[in-house]
Amino acid sequence: MSLKYAGPKPLISAHGITFDLNKDDKFIYLSIVAELIQALNHEYVGGERYTHITAKKPMDCDEILELIRRNDPLLDQEIQDRQKIVEQEIQEELERAHSNRVLCEEERDVLVKNIELLRSYRINRSINKTVYYSAISSLAHIIQKGHIDTIFAPMFPKFTHVFHSIQGALVKLHPPIDSTIDIYEENGHLNVRLDILFRK
């Protein structure tokens, strides 16, 4: 299995295929979460501040997958389970399309073909999403274990999205961990900060 970009969420109908550009493929965030895992997953000395400079060249997809696998040994099983769910959803959609009596025969045929056409696309998106949320869960556990209280990053939309996902994963931990996200200016540059609020 290898990671690859699929694209935004497809909207399939008997009249064609459109894409929800507000729901992009989680693949676009995988290099950021992998870099964060690399940057945060180490031993910590109390009171020290750590800086991580990202590599000039993006991480290879196989490297990203291997890094995330090392932090989640169950990843391959999670991918298989998710793939089965998506396959089942597609099969149910095909059955509904075949038995749809509101559409004429030509429209039913178009709908069935459109669903089939995007089968591998949707499976690929689901794999990327599974890998992404596995990595986010790993990051939440790394933060918890290392008692990391603040993470800074340049203010790019992708970092902000990832920080929001980490917030969601932190709240699901036992015990839950609260956090805040702030955008601030420093030396003429916008930055984003994730503050983790450990309970005393």
Image (tube, grey):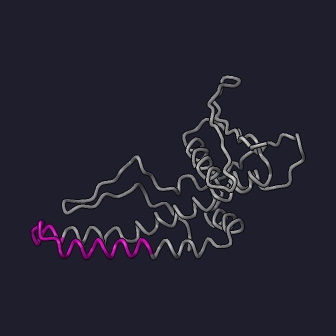
Judge by depth and name the residue closer to the eye, 60 or 130.
130
Say whether residue 14 is left or right of residue 163: left
Q: x, y (%) of residue 197?
A: 71, 40
Q: x, y (%) of residue 43?
A: 86, 54
Q: Quadrant of residue 71?
A: bottom right
Is residue 155 a member of the stretch shown in magenta? no
Q: Main secondary structure of the magenta part?
A: helix
Is residue 102 a member of the stretch shown in magenta? yes
Up/down of 56 relative to 66, above or below:
above
Look at 71% across and 50% down and name the residue there.
Answer: 55
Judge by depth and name the residue closer to the eye, 48 or 175.
175
Up/down of 199 relative to 38, above or below:
above
Look at 54% across and 40% down and name the residue there.
Answer: 157
Furthest residue to the left? Answer: 104
Look at 57% across and 72% down and name the residue there.
Answer: 78
Magenta span of residues: 85-109
Look at 62% across and 71% down and name the residue there.
Answer: 75
Q: x, y (%) of residue 28?
A: 53, 53
Furthest residue to the top? Answer: 188
